[in-house]
Amino acid sequence: MLCKDLVIIGGGPAGLAAALEAAEQGVKDVMIVERDSGLGGILQQCIHNGFGLHVFKEELTGPEYAQKFIDKLENTGVEVLLDTMVIEITPDKRIFAVNSRIGVLEIQSKAVILAMGCRERTRGALNIPGFRPAGIFTAGTAQRYVNIEGYMPGKEIVILGSGDIGLIMARRFTLEGAKVKCVLEIMPYSNGLTRNVVQCLEDYGIPLRLSHTVIDIHGKKRVEGVTVAKVDENLKPILSTAEFIPCDTLLLSVGLIPENELTKMTGADFDASTQGPMVNQRMETSCEGIFACGNVLHVHDLVDFVTMEARLAARGAAQYLKEKDGSCRGTKVIAGEGLRYVLPHAVCVEKMLDEKLNFFMRSTRPMNKAKLVIESENGIVKTKMLSYLKPSEMINIELKKSEIEKAEGHLKFILQEEGVLQ
Amino acid sequence: MSDKRNVTCIICPVGCRIEVELENEDILNLSGYRCKRGLQYAKDEVTSPKRILTTTVRLKARSAHVLPVRTRAPIPRSCMKDAMKELKSVFVCPPVKMGDVVLKDVAGTGVDVIASRSWTE
Amino acid sequence: MYDVVVIGGGVTGCMIARELSRYDIRVILLEKEEDVACGTSKANSAVIHAGFDAKPGTWKAKMNVRGNALFPGICAELDVPYKNNGSLVVAVDEGEIKVLDKLMNQGKENGVPGLKIIGHDELMKMEPNLNPAAKAALYASTAGIVCPYEFTVALAENAAQNDVEFRFNSPVMEIMVQNDGFIIKTPHGAVKARFVINAAGLFSDEISKMAGAEEYTITPRKGEYLIFDKNFGHLVKRVIFPTPSEKSKGILVCPTVDGNVFIGPNSNDIKDKTDVGVTREGIEEIIEGGKKLVPHLPLSGVITSFAGLRAVSNTNDFIIEASRKVKGFVNVGGIQSPGLTSAPAIAETVIEILKEEGMDLIEKPGFVPTRPRKYRFREMDNAMRQKLIEENPAFGHVICRCETVTEAEIVDAIKRPLGAKSLDGVKRRTRAGMGRCQGGFCSSRVLSILARELKLDPRQITKCGPGSEILKGGYKEFIAEGDENKFLNAQDVESLSWKGGEASVM
């Protein structure tokens, strides 16, 4: 059995940043366990630019963003175990993993950072009727075929869902000579970043059809077309608007789900809204010494925030290794009206790593103008006016340690929509 | 005769729809913007829209067949198609380092195409 | 000249082929798809029924009870997952309780052991997630669940090992009746045989007509299903039926041997025998039906939906008989539920029919009753895993993370007798792609392994046979060539190597 101070599960953006930060904090004996044959995770297939504006103050592609971390990792002494799949983790931080070289590895770690990322929602989760032919891909799977394997999974494509990967793939397929017929979005607003709508769709004249969805998939062997329809306010298809669109491929970009099968084995508490574990101010789950960061915790829209969160988790792990203190929960954080969730879920003021703390949250719906109110049992802690909110763009607010200290009982975040501004 | 074009600003999350009135190539009027940065963005978008092109080229490596690449600087949007055609026949053999030039002066833009990641074997 | 040709590679055809492989005769099985278990046998409730549903004296009743008794033994012999978890028919009002009594008596008449009526309290203890309005249930201790496609594949593998020939992508186009047998034409050549066994499922009526044998009709009756994530595998332990209607056993809530739970099927007669599309109304119908049994269904945990077609004959019973019009032609048609359970008994019956029809069946000494060992990495302990990885490092390479399927298992699925040729073939043999991400992670990796092992271009790899290729084009295939191509072509560039920081493209 191997013994480690810190094991990081996953060598994508979260795992890489956590490993570097842990090494910087002086944690010895750090190991990254990565299932793929190289580091970087999903960034390696995200060959488009737009990464790094916050962390590096320059615009990088996914592989470049990853490469910067990989290059830095070389001299840190962090051990990297590639081609290795973690198959089990126990609440007392014992990890079982398999690879071809060693077989079954058993690792006892003093602290663990979970950085497994997320997976894509599939057709099954949407209950799209129709046949089950070849030619239905999640956007990320199609991205891997094109950008990693070098094959074209489709020539005439309809994309369901305006998530960022779908928008990016619309452009990618068009550049590679395929025809993207349209992007359908069931909501009345796009789920991707505005810049992606402009640069991936408008640049190439690809129609974005809001309040539309796929109601049938045709073709028994390979996709031959889809029937699409407009939806009403309750997102129910209006059958009289049904329209057949011939295509050979249906791409799904309908959301991401944190990959928490290992986390569940630790018995950590979960947030039903993020589908990830509940964490405190240092990204520690309710299971002592087990931390989480990146998309395994909640799905991010910018990798830069993943990096920042991973650094926080690494500093938390370093603090835990030094002080051997348990998972203190302290003040409870509550997502109130107008918000889907707020992270972290609890703050232990005494253990705060800095004099301030960032809270991340998502609104339940688009709002032009809204007042964010943070209250505790003894009154309002802070308010802030926010404008142009979209559920797809994360809200970030900083609270001072002194502000949190004063709060009694809990911190409740509420988003109150103000009069429509135009 | 004047012509109207709509530009969605991507500078910040507001996403202003800016209307640009043009005559031939000259801007007559701009409306709908909320800040100076948006104004400049809209001007650039209608006169010379540029983008960074990100794509792949063939990699002759043992464990991979595709290398991600990008233009070092934005190139005119109108050159994208030609750039893709040129890159179709580009092959690279490892070792390659991130930032290495893969193709000089793509599609006559004067901009080089560079590797987006390193590959050793 | 073959002694027997079996038409159809579903569970019925494969079970018959496997039983025939015990004897010293030449047998061939023709299948129109690229693999066995591509029709009704892959999309059904996977329940081994106890046998109380069918009317006494029918083929269904006889075959069901006998098949149920034979099932555990065959599964053990062929290493197919089978679980004897019992079934419950749930009654929610007085009227339905009366139906339970009737079913129990019918079951007793059919010879079903282990039946009893259970009251509300005991029922809720057995299945805590059940609708609290449930008043009573008929419990059948002999009911169970199996993996129907793995069962069919195992039968086919074992038949192949014992020298039954299989010909795929071979729909029967014409049957010529001759004095000494039959000539059966397929796109891959003709087959001559003394006996024909028609196990063509939904198409058995057409095959019978082709041979000039008795006429009957098969109506496809669609059943739709939703499958839940394994995280909700504890929802129910037993097969849960509502009180049945005239037409079907109703919408079940049921565990699978692999640890999932499903709801379905509904029951709708349709016209097209290939229409396995799921419908919006169908999904709503099964959700509504499922909720009557288990009110709190984890609908956010649905991982996929599918539909299967039951082959319903106009007699509403199985048709298992030698033709009186065409000597040597045996019909095995209308095998709808409980067809899976009945398969072992149907095969026994067909052997008897062949003997009566004058076939000499002499057991051959070399018959092997087991199939090559099947490894299931996810079910092993770590010591066993370690041992296997030492023997074959490919066991250390997990390809499907949701179902923990290793490269070694995928390669084995391809190289076994009647090995997998497509993504679906691999999926049915290993479960790679059947988990919560539905192949999002592993399908491109499985595709590469298939291409490597079958020595094919990745573009030739299909989901389920010709016409279902996964990839549409190769590298930059859809980009039109530039006319003023100032670059060297591929061959010239290949010989150049990378020099310093400059690319070797010019």
Image: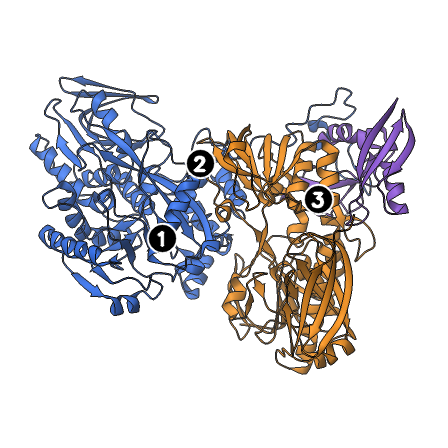
- Let me know if residue A42 appears in the view: yes
For marks 2 and 1, give the one nearer the viewer. 1
> Would you identify the image quadrant in which residue B109 lies?
top right
Q: Are marks 3 and 2 in contact (CB under 8 Å)?
A: no
For marks 3 and 2, give the one nearer the viewer. 2
- Let me know if residue A28 appears in the view: no
Q: Do the residues marked 2 and 1 share a common chain? A: no
Q: CA distance from mark 3 to mark 2?
A: 32 Å
Determine the secondary structure under disc 1: helix
Q: Position of residue C4 (x, y in %)?
A: 19, 30
Q: CA distance from mark 2 to mark 1?
A: 22 Å
Chain identifier, orange in the render = A
Q: CA distance from mark 3 to mark 1?
A: 45 Å
Q: Colour of chain C?
A: blue
Residues packed near mark 1 inside 10 Å, few (<14), some (14 to 19) or many (20 plus): many
Residues packed near mark 2 inside 10 Å, few (<14), some (14 to 19) or many (20 plus): many
Residue drawn at (10%, 38%), measured in percent from left and top? C352
Q: Which is nearer the eye, A403 or A202? A: A403
Residue type, label 3: Ile
Query: Who comes first in sequence, dot 3 or dot 2?
Result: 3
> Would you identify the image quadrant in which residue A400 lies?
bottom right
Determine the secondary structure under disc 2: loop
Residue bearing mark 2: A131
Q: Is residue C94 above or below residue A205?
A: below
Q: Is residue A94 above or below residue C377?
A: below
- Residue A47 — which label? 3
Tell me if B71 is positioned left or right of C277 in this view: right
